[in-house]
Amino acid sequence: MNTIERMAESKAVKLEKNEIKGGVHRRQQHDSAHKHVTGTAEYIDDLTEPFGTLHAYLGLSERAHADIVSIDLDAVQRQPGVVAVLTAKDIPGENDVSPVGRHDDPVFASKRVEFHGQPIFAVVAETREAARRAARKAEISYSELAHVTDVVEADKAGLPMVFPPMTLKRGDALDALAKAKHRLAGEMRIGGQDHFYLEGQVAMAIPGEDDDVIVWSSTQHPSEVQHMVGHVLGIPSNAVTVNVRRMGGGFGGKETQANLFAAVAALAAKRLGRAVKIRPDRDDDMVATGKRHDFHVAYAVGFDDDGRIEGVDATYAARCGFSADLSGPVTDRALFHADNAYYFPSVHLTSKPLKTNTVSNTAFRGFGGPQGMVGCERMIEEIAYALGKDPLAVRKANFYGEGRNVTPYHQTVEDNIAPRIVAELEASADYQARRKAIVEFNATSRVVKKGIALTPVKFGISFTKTEYNQAGALVHIYTDGSIHLNHGGTEMGQGLNTKVAQVLADAFQVDLAHVKITATTTAKVPNTSATAASSGSDLNGMAAADAAEQIKDRLRDFAAEKWSVERDQVVFTVNQVQVGNQLIAFADFIQLAYQARVQLSAAGFYKTPKIHWDRDKGEGRPFYYFAYGASCSEVSVDTLTGEYHVDRTDILHDVGRSLNPAIDIGQIEGGFIQGMGWLTTEELWWDDKGRLRTHAPSTYKIPLASDRPRVFNVKLADWSKNHEATVKRSKAVGEPPFMLAISVLEALSMAAASVAGYRICPRLDAPATPERVLMAIERLRAEVGG
Amino acid sequence: MTAAIRNIIRFYLNDRLVELSRVAPDETLLDWLRLSARLRGTKEGCAEGDCGACTVLVGRLTSGALRYETVNACIRFLGSLDGCHVVTVEHLAAQDGRLHPVQQAMVDADASQCGFCTPGFVMSAYALWMQNPEPTVGQVEKALQGNLCRCTGYEPIVKAIEAACAKGGQAGDPLMVERAAMTEKLAALKDGRRVAIGEGRDRLVLPASVDDLADVLSAEPQATIVAGATDVGLWVTKFMRDISPVVFIAHLDELHAIEGRGDMLAIGACVTYTEAFALIAERYPEFVDLWDRIGGEQVRNMGTIGGNVANGSPIGDTPPALIALDAVVVLRKGDGMRRVPIADFFIDYGKQDRAPGEFVAAIEIPAPAEGARFAAYKVSKRREEDISSVCGAFRLSLSPSGTVDDVVLAFGGMAATPKRASHVEAALRGKAWTEETVADAVTLFAEDFTPLTDWRASSHYRLLVAMNLLRRFQLETAGESVRLERQVA
């Protein structure tokens, strides 16, 4: 083939290809997939350490609640390899890492310990092994105080709240309850959950000149780590640079919980003038860092003969642990989801963020929403079993709809697609026929009983703290046409970087391969929000698009002038720029722009419109929009042991116009399984000394491959499109699918209910371990005298 | 006494020979890989053999045959690798960067999210792909029992493995191509010498033979005997216990012998769960369900039946069944051997009938009497890769008239040792084997056991489940289908 032929062929290929590779709305593999499978993706513990790097390890409290009488670290100091020990006295700034400014979250406890596992000191040694061994040699004497670990006991004992509670109300709930034809009251316990990110907490600090320190932190919130390191060291934020390329999982567990580790590493590094790394063992990580809140929900619900709710009065008490951390907004979000997809004509909801002598609980995928929603679905079940109805019929009777579209927080639901999603899933999963078959099966099967449930999800998207709904991005185009992307979001596996890069590739109409994703750093994009609340691509995608738009604007001006065309005749097309009638390769175009001294770099910015929230009044529009979904699960239960299998799950989920269907499906499948773990086998268990005894995978059981539904059908609602002007009309996907797992809990409940003719609500608490399932069955059998 | 002693360990790491003269007895393969060899593709997720992020392959010669198996590098001691071939994730992609078919399949199926667990999954998938080119979904799930992923929900990983297996290409795989050469290289490392490294409180020994082991233990009766390290590994990584001097025994071919001697099955102390699987499945098919739920694949590849017994844990998976089957523990000290019925071996919590310097050489399981029924049940919070809340194993012989001639009911998780329910057994003997008899007898479990309440289960649940397992046994022997099956293709 001669040159001309080759050119002709390549042109033909170009003409055929009418779209870029890796643009939006296309399946695109995770940007690090190749590095993941080869083991070359670097996590913080994999980075090449600077010469002379030291290792820090924490010394933890061995009492749940006690005054510290004395701390004797001489033996620690004398251990081989030990370079220094650090206590509260060694902190030059403030001994506090409270993310909400309540000054209740010390780095090191000094006078009193408030949970078993609270950090008291750090030891720094030449090796991690030496530091870890030395930490055990501390002699700390305590004067013990009474401790409370359980949320119900904390309430009874009158323990204080760690954050002011919130109330949501509309109408007169008590009056509605009094007037309703049927009334039910009950309570439910909902367990907490450990994040079990596979990469534990880790930080490495490298000291610099003056006050400077660079911290590599496995954090979802680099800006907060920056601020906390500054507070603890007593230095301004501009001396601290926080970097994160990727996390080995976060799920909320690295939103605030990375602060302490980063602060300790930075403290040691500045004091000793050497790089310092800190990485707790898995057990210490699980003992010393916060988790999902356990809840106790007490509810009263009034309803009519059709199961239609008339009034709800409910209280949501949460085990917050010893400090506030994010417990205020977490319990708020439980209330925001206490209605799930249903209209409560009159409602009164109150949160109780209670202090306990346990680790301070924190953000976890859903952020209180799941607990609120599980409580809601329990009320639906109660109504269904009381009336002898299929719970799905009760769900449908209560959906938001025309004239019934105001939430307990007075936001109008404008985008309700729950009825359509549920109807489509009901049909595609063949729910009615399968339910009938299951009821027939249960009538003859003595030991194995089955259950099926179809549950919806409606999840509010936006940080309820309005100022968090902003984001920045920094985009450079270099003279060879290659693009450098940086934004304030962090990558924890959710594919955020891939999605934002797709948005940028789409904006410039270049193949994704031309966009380089770079590590998140506070030095490039300042004052960022946590990558949390499912907001990552909504916020950072828009910020990156804004940066691209600024550069494109300048490029249009440049081209319009240079080639004497109208601005609208400058079009970014597939790897080229069309100016009037001529096509110029993108790289060539950029080179010309550079020569013409066009600024090829921009800082983009975005803030979510329309939202506002008045917490004191309990009124406003906390959410920009809602994401919806539904799932249908079928289970089999062994009524001799309470063991079970999930036989099949069908999911239909709404991500608006998907930015990347491959990544979105991954978030839905993974979120569902994680939610299923929370509601089934993942159990946190404290002993009478206040020690968490489920602190490693040997004792804390997250789902395995063989626990996933045997048949697992996951589909996107491909007709959906965000009615708000989000990035490419997509919707957030991180958290909402987590709550799809509620169908598993409800299906287990139905299997249990079968032993009593579906006439008694099993009141199956979460997590529904085999033991809880068997005990629910035993209770029902006893009640019907069988 | 062996004359020649070697003071270095030698093994292959990917494509190079490693010789180490300084090896701490408690140094793990994972720490050595990450800190000394600086191969950081292998991750630490838990340091207790439960998450699989540290999964590597270890190739070993047993009776001349080379087998590659997944192991947890976090609890595998470096010293025990003498004569082995360690394969890490760094070895899989081709020199030119081309991904291994298993890796490519993972990429194509979007099977990684955060990526931290991924190298471990790649190694587990790789081992399966090599050993079983056409696995069922159930076999894929079994191969992944020891790998935790918190992001994906596993679906794309399972699909990736199916796709990789469907694609094949095993013949061109470097480990397959190099198999014969590596077998020779490893054989050349086996020089029949005892290995001894270190001194004072920092020593390890790899005896040359079982006789040499007897000598070593006679000289050092307090040494820590380490076979699969699935328990001792945690003494180090979790409790930082001093285990020196250590005597590693899993390399001894003689202790890997498993053979039928007439009606009896003799299992060498270092036979792993994986090695025993085929013969167990053939002779005691009722044992298979439980066998597949012991640890994860890596733990089954490392863990030994001898260790499960010698360790004396009240929640070990095999002792109840071994008690029900009237197994005998063969103990050796010096040149002396003795045989102890396994039920008598477990004296009390943490106390077994094993003298200092004595070691478990083998477990012998007689064939059940003609017509006897046997069952082994495990109940745990999570179905797989979990420790039992209750483990029950039963053996029953009925008279021609249907009354109970002989019955053994052995339990784990119900007392400080694996223990028989003697009151219930007594109540059943001579009675008609019916639902009614069982319903009456089960109330006596409360006489036999006062189980603990802990994070795995409450005392109440354990007692109830013990009763219900006996009910299940009765129903099953009566021909009723009363078991939950996860039906996978």
Image (cartoon, coloured by chain):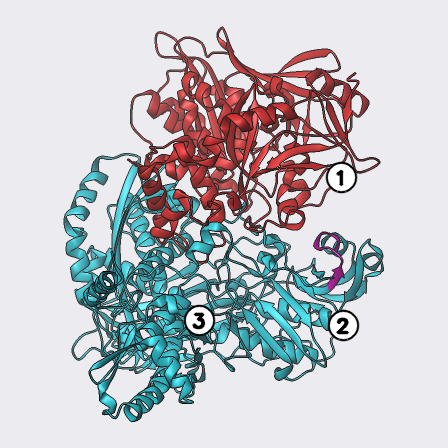
Chain colours: A cyan, B red
Q: Give the range drawn in magenta.
A: A122-130
- Displayed quadrant of residue A357: bottom right
Q: In this view, does B429 lie to the left or right of A424?
A: right
Chain letter of the residue beneath label 3 in the structure image: A
Whether residue B316 is visible, yes or no, is: no
The image shows residue B299 at horizontal and vertical percentages of: 53, 35
Label 3 belongs to which residue? A532
Q: What element carries label 2?
A: helix
Chain letter of the residue beneath label 2 in the structure image: A
The image shows residue B465 at horizontal and vertical percentages of: 44, 35
Q: Which of A40 and A670 is in front in this view?
A: A40
Mark 2 neighbour class, 10 Å CA radius: few under 14, some 14 to 19, many 20 or more: some
Label 1 belongs to which residue? B22
**Badge 3 amino acid:** Ala
Q: Is mark 1 on a helix, strand or loop?
A: loop
Mark 1 neighbour class, 10 Å CA radius: few under 14, some 14 to 19, many 20 or more: few
Q: Residue B124 carries which label?
A: none
**Badge 2 amino acid:** Arg
Q: Is residue A139 above or below residue A547?
A: above
Label 2 belongs to which residue? A271
Quarter of the image with the C terminus of chain A in it: top left
Q: In this view, does B99 lie to the left or right of A179?
A: right
Mark 3 neighbour class, 10 Å CA radius: few under 14, some 14 to 19, many 20 or more: many
Quarter of the image with the N terminus of chain A in it: bottom left
Q: Is residue B38 above or below residue A445?
A: below
Q: Which of B279 and B13 is in front in this view?
A: B13
- Displayed quadrant of residue A623: bottom left
Q: Is residue B306 left or right of residue A741?
A: right
Q: Do the residues labelled 3 and 1 touch (CB within 8 Å)?
A: no
Q: Is mark 3 on a helix, strand or loop?
A: loop
In whole angstroms, how far apart are the C-alphas of marks 3 and 1?
47 Å
Q: Residue at position x 18%, y 46% from top? A: A434
